[in-house]
Image (tube, rainbow, N blue to C red):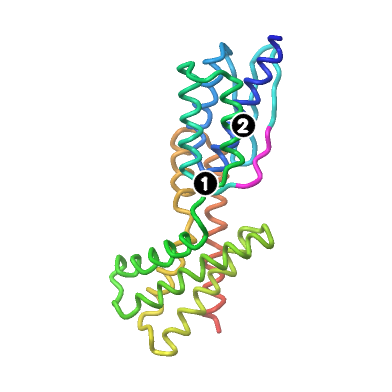
């Protein structure tokens, strides 16, 4: 009976850790949440090793160890907040371990993302705002807005079809560059560089770069270097896509 309860506690901790990593949480926050959940169940001395692609969690000496693979990662702050809420309720005994596990399963299966149309509008508006922030001319706002919105649509669709993140970002950056070039060619845009830079801003992995720096500063070198390499590859894909268009 005790082993069954410990197994459920491990499953609960691993599920919480997986949801947080998949949603873009920092490594130290994931480890801290898993440790607090384990302590609330009387599991002292647990060990966890968290990377962007996998989680290992052990009860320590003479205890079982589990491994969970992480395949997809997005930015979903609401899901991170819900997992933290479950963790806090478990720590204050508002939830039993069984109830916490069921609640985490509901969070895992829930689609908390905003509708695609709203994401598209947000990406387009953000691109237009970035152009103003970069001291661009007002005449270029419509071009940057359209380029940024279409770039977001393309990266989402290509990623759904191919499941290759960097290829999708390369194609999306190419589309942004092409639309910016056409805008200047047709004289509906003026500053090609500012339009392109503003249009690719929704593709830039800002949260990933921030988490990479925070993980490195916290001493999580494996996670920090992994996230930094992923951000570097994304930057390379965006740059290569734009350079391909400008080379013609």
Say which residue label 2 marks.
15
Quadrant in the picture for residue 60: top right
- Measured as percent of width and height from the top left, residue 93 is found at 49, 16
Name the element at disc 1: loop
Mark toward the start of the polypeptide (1 vs 2):
2
Compared across the picture, whether 96 is left or right of 68 comes to left
Region rendered in magenta: 68-72
Looking at the rendered image, the quarter that the C terminus falls into is bottom right
- Measured as percent of width and height from the top left, residue 203 is found at 49, 61
Say which residue label 1 marks.
112
Looking at the rendered image, the quarter that the N terminus falls into is top right
Label number found at residue 102: none
Front-lying residue, 229 or 126: 126
- Measured as percent of width and height from the top left, residue 135 is found at 28, 70
- Asked if residue 69 lies in the magenta stretch, the reply is yes
Q: Residues within 10 Å of mark 1 (few under 14, many from 20)?
A: few
Q: Which residue sits at x=47%, y=23%?
A: 89
Name the element at disc 2: helix
Q: Residues within 10 Å of mark 2 (few under 14, many from 20)?
A: many
Distance from disc 1 to disc 2, alpha carbons, whole Å, reads 17 Å
Residue 44 seen: no
């Amino acid at each position: 009976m005790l082993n069954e309860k410990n197994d459920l506690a491990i499953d609960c901790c691993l599920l919480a850790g997986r949801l947080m990593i998949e949603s873009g949480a920092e490594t130290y926050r994931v480890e801290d949440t898993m440790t607090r959940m384990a302590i609330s169940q009387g599991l002292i001395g647990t060990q966890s090793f968290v990377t962007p692609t996998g989680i290992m969690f052990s009860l320590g000496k003479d205890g079982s160890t589990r491994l969970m693979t992480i395949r997809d990662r997005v930015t979903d702050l609401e899901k991170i907040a819900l997992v933290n809420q479950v963790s806090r309720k478990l720590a204050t005994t508002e939830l039993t371990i069984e109830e916490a596990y069921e609640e985490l399963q509901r969070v895992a299966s829930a689609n908390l993302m905003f509708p695609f149309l709203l994401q598209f509008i947000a990406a387009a508006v953000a691109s237009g705002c970035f152009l103003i922030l970069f001291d661009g001319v007002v005449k270029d706002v419509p071009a940057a807005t359209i380029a940024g919105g279409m770039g977001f649509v393309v990266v989402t669709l290509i990623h759904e079809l191919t499941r290759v993140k960097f290829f999708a970002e390369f194609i999306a950056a190419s589309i942004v560059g092409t639309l910016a070039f056409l805008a200047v060619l047709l004289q509906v845009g003026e500053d090609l560089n500012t339009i392109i830079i503003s249009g690719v801003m929704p593709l830039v992995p800002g949260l990933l770069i921030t988490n990479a720096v925070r993980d490195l500063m916290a001493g999580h070198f494996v996670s920090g270097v992994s996230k930094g390499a992923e951000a570097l590859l994304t930057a390379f894909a965006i740059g290569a896509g734009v350079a391909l268009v400008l080379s013609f």
